Image (cartoon, rainbow, N blue to C red):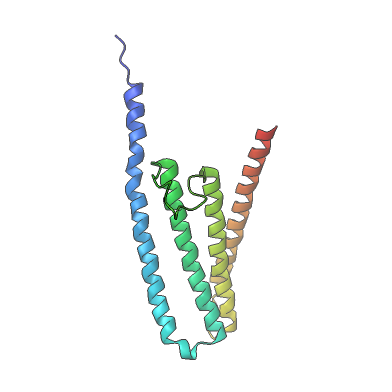
């Protein structure tokens, strides 16, 4: 008599994907955190509105863009990750369904994540460069690490894109 352990094991393994679902639910909490930080910053900027310089307005704008990019990053991971690894979302007929929804595979998700991170590190670097014009004391070590991290992320993104491009070319041949 032969005991089949492969079938039950594979069913358990497949069902284990649902262990990731609470993590995606936790990303909703991350969006709430970002919204709270955004609201607090809006109030802070609104209270300084009459004395705000162009320089401060640029820094505030960059901070808002930073929060928006982070929120987009969380949404991208939440939707594409859940759709790719846990379960399909049954919203095909919803009027607000994004065009990319259901079309982002793991390779596209990886590249979108890297691109978002490059944009975020770029904004952080730009904010630090903007500090060069203000009275704030510039931390050269912090600036150096921001440049190193940004260049590393740009290189990593370029290599990931090159790898995907080479993989697509190999499929064509």
Q: How many numbered marks appear?
A: 0
Q: In the figure, is residue 91 to the left or right of 171? A: left
Quadrant position of residue 152: bottom right
Residue 52: x and y in percent read 50, 87
Q: Which quadrant would the C terminus be assigned to in this image? A: top right
Residue drawn at (48%, 48%), measured in percent from left and top?
101
Looking at the picture, how far across and down is residue 25, in whole percent?
34, 52
Q: Is residue 4 left or right of residue 119?
A: left
Q: Is residue 39 above or below residue 135?
A: above
Residue drawn at 54 percent across, 87 percent down:
53
In the image, farthest residue toward the right: 173
Q: Among all residues in the image, which is located at the extreme top?
A: 1
Looking at this view, is 73 or 146 the one in front? 73
**Above or below for 56 versus 102:** below
The N terminus - image quarter: top left
| Of 39 and 95, the residue lying toward us | 95
**Is residue 140 in view?**
no
Where is 34 relative to 113, above or below?
A: below
Instruction: Residue 149: give x, y in percent of width and height.
Output: 56, 61
> What x and y, as percent, mark residue 138?
55, 78
Q: Residue at horizontal 63%, vertical 52%?
A: 158
Is residue 57 shown above or below 161?
below
Q: Residue at x 42, y 47 (%)?
A: 93
Q: Is residue 144 among what the camera can see?
A: yes
Q: Quadrant of residue 168?
A: top right
Q: Residue furthest bottom?
A: 51
């Amino acid at each position: 008599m032969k005991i089949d352990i492969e079938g039950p094991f594979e069913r358990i393994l497949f069902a284990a994907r649902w262990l990731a679902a609470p993590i995606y639910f936790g990303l909703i909490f991350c969006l709430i955190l970002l919204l709270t930080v955004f609201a607090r910053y809006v109030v802070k900027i609104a209270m300084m509105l009459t004395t705000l310089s162009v320089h401060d307005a640029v820094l505030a704008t960059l901070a808002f863009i930073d929060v928006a990019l982070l929120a987009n990053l969380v949404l991208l991971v939440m939707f594409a990750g859940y759709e790719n690894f846990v379960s399909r979302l049954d919203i095909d007929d919803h009027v607000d369904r994004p065009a990319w929804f259901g079309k982002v595979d793991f390779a596209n998700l990886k590249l979108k994540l890297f691109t978002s991170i490059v944009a975020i590190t770029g904004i952080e670097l730009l904010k630090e460069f903007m500090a060069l014009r203000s009275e704030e004391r510039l931390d050269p070590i912090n600036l150096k690490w921001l440049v190193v991290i940004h260049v590393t992320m740009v290189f990593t993104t370029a290599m990931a894109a090159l790898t995907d491009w080479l993989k697509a070319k190999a499929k064509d041949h």
